């Protein structure tokens, strides 16, 4: 009797996993990369030393749709021995020329370079960018991030924004896999794992409050 009961419970558990694992993974992906709605004054594009074409297209689409008025492109400047060869000095000018070629006026974009000499990088970045946005008169902005980095970046930026009256709406960009089927792609699994670890690291270090993890502001 006990053996039959064990087999029955095991079968139910297996069936439950088969039925629910995809929705559960999908929701976990959406948690790490929430996407807001509505209209804002600007879209902040979180680049690295360079920025992907797809991310800029996503930002430009928000402008064309009338959902944002300006683009603020954030580039990171690493120590000299970590910089990309032959890129750093002329890259911002080239970006400006390309943005104008794609239809933006000079007053519709700004390119900000953030010196990164220490970790944690995202926190260092947000501490520089948020005051600039406040000085520029921005009260609300989309925060365009890469994939599963979105949740951590949003929380760090919003934590800084609370002190300056700047509200952020997360807007993820997925370059190589679909958000709702991320577990089917090697890159998706790698990013999910690494960004989950980094989110836990920020929580453990106190850079992000555990109480802010489920704050209601991700959806615009």
Image: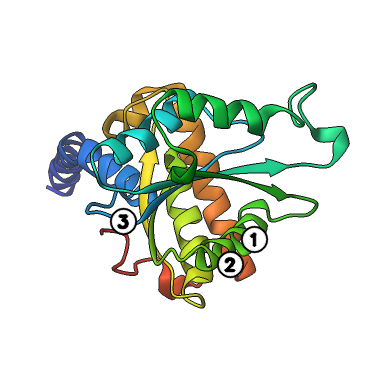
Percent across and percent down for residue 159 are: 50, 70
Residue farthest front in this picture: 106
N-terminal of the two: label 2 or label 3?
A: 3
Between 73 and 219, the one nearer to me in the picture: 73
Above or below, 102 relative to 15? above
Label 1 element class: helix
Label 2, label 1: how many angstroms apart (C-alpha)? 6 Å
| Neighbour tally class for label 2: few under 14, some 14-19, many 20 plus, Cα within 10 Å | some
Label 2 element class: helix
Residue beneath label 2, please?
131
Label 2, label 3: how many angstroms apart (C-alpha)? 17 Å
Question: In the image, which disc is placed on residue 40?
Answer: 3
Question: In the image, which disc is placed on residue 128?
Answer: 1
Above or below, 118 relative to 14? below
Coloring scheme used: rainbow
- Marks 2/3 in contact by CB < 8 Å: the verdict is no
Above or below, 109 relative to 201? above
Q: Viewed as shown, does residue 201 lie left or right of 215? A: right
Percent across and percent down for residue 13 are: 20, 43
- Marks 2/1 in contact by CB < 8 Å: the verdict is yes
| Neighbour tally class for label 1: few under 14, some 14-19, many 20 plus, Cα within 10 Å | some
Label 3, label 1: how many angstroms apart (C-alpha)? 20 Å
């Amino acid at each position: 009797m006990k053996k039959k009961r064990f087999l029955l419970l095991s079968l139910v558990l297996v069936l439950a996993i088969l039925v629910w694992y995809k929705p559960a993974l999908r929701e976990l992906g959406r948690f790490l990369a929430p996407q807001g709605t509505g209209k804002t004054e600007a879209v902040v594009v979180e680049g690295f030393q360079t920025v992907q074409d797809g991310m800029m297209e996503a930002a430009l689409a928000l402008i064309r749709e009338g959902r944002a008025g300006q683009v603020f492109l954030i580039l990171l400047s690493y120590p000299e021995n970590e910089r990309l060869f032959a890129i750093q000095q002329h890259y911002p000018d080239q970006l400006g020329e390309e943005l104008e070629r794609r239809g933006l006026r000079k007053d519709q974009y700004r390119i900000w370079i953030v010196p990164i000499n220490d970790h944690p990088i995202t926190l260092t970045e947000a501490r520089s960018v948020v005051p600039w946005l406040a000085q520029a008169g921005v009260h609300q902005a989309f925060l365009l991030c890469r994939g599963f980095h979105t949740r951590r970046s949003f929380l760090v930026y919003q934590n800084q924004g609370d002190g300056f009256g700047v509200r952020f709406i997360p807007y993820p960009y997925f370059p190589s896999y679909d958000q709702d089927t991320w577990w089917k792609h090697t890159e998706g699994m790698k990013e999910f794992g690494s960004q989950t670890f980094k989110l836990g690291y920020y929580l453990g270090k106190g850079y992000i409050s555990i109480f802010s993890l489920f704050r209601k502001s991700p959806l615009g």
